[in-house]
Image: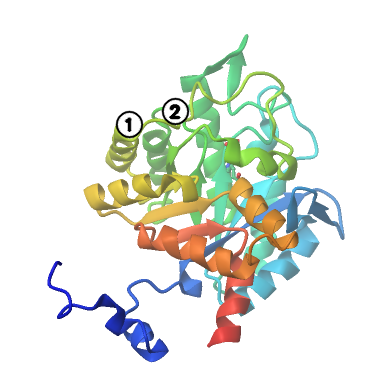
Amino acid sequence: MANFPIKRLRRLRYNPSVRDLVRETVLTKNDLIYPLFVVPGQKIKKEIRSMPGVYQMSVDVIVEECKDVEKLGIPAVILFGIPEHKDEVGSGAYDPNGIIQKAVRAIKKGTNKLLVITDVCLCEYTSHGHCGVLNGEKILNDETVELLVKESLSHAEAGADIIAPSDMMDGRIGAIRKALDEKGFIETPILSYAVKYASGFYGPFRDAAESAPAFGDRRSHQMDIANGNEALREAETDIEEGADIIMVKPAGAYLDIIWRVKEKFGMPTAAYQVSGEYAMIKAAGRNNWIDEERVMIESLTAIKRAGADMILTYFAKDVVNYLQKVS
Ligand code: PBG
């Protein structure tokens, strides 16, 4: 690279049309998955304090929302449910008439081709806010996997297009795949939250999903933020167990991990720009400390450049509106 002045990298930067020609990464609406929070009741649309522009919605409202999302051309939503009642074993998660099951049926009926992905975990459904069955303060792995299997099956039976386990129990992908196949859901893909870190960036989500743990934290099952090689072992395990899509979460602070997972396995790879990432950009934008729209696009383009094929983001609708505006 030392042969200046023959080599001038700025030559391709002076003219905006030349910049357009050589751009390597372009965000499109097809990259986006929009997360939604479903609550019991009717006509409810309640903004989440720490996530401006994101709402808890009742089933009737969410169906209308999904029609808009489909009209915008966003291919998929992912649903999180807040049940009427919580208990020790999270029964609301696998109730055939639970909040998610109702929402999936209504959305599939009210839309044409919108993909409905369901998050599979127990933390929103347990009275203690932990992701599994407890013995004292310990989350039991294998007993929890049994319930996650029930939850996944009930989502598939309600009509979910893709099942997305986010719990980080060992062995759940294999168990869920086997159960889905036995019930005839051989064509239903699993999007595994394979590489999920015990992250502070999930703070606002716990307001949104009312799922903060009553004691302790999630470090006994989610990954240590300091580990990279372990991410590859997590991804490999889930791929072997039958995951069709691998997720890395959070996204922005883990671009190296997205890159390594994509390079090593070449699998369809998802990344989750989580609630805290969204909240920080929103808050700084509202204070005019940063240009919100610009940082939104920059953060998502970086996630795609790192190797993500799809991005779960609370900005999904804003991105499509922006892309329409600039095109
Ligand atoms: C678990 C789940 C969480 C998120 C997605 N699925 C919370 C957690 O693990 O504590 C976080 C998403 C976000 O922060 O936007 N059901």
Q: Residues within 10 Å of mark 2 (few under 14, many from 20)?
A: some
- Give the camera-side residue of 3 and 156: 3
In the image, residue 182 lies at what x, y percent?
Answer: 40, 42
| Label annotation for residue 321 | none
Three-letter code for the amino acid on which mark 1 is drawn: Glu
Task: Please name the residue shown 30% across and 83% down the image.
Answer: 12
Q: In the rendered image, which quarter is residue 129 located in?
A: top right
Q: Earlier in the sequence, mark 1 or mark 2?
A: 2
Instruction: Kindly check if marks 1 and 2 are in contact, taking CB atoms under 8 A apart as contact.
Output: yes
Task: Please name the residue shown 56% across and 46% down the image.
Answer: 119
Residue under numbered circle 2: 224
Q: CA distance from mark 1 to mark 2?
A: 9 Å
Three-letter code for the amino acid on which mark 2 is drawn: Asp
**Does 256 sit above or below residue 75?**
above
**Does 164 sit above or below residue 169?**
below
Residue under numbered circle 1: 230
The residue tagged with tag 2: helix, strand or loop? loop
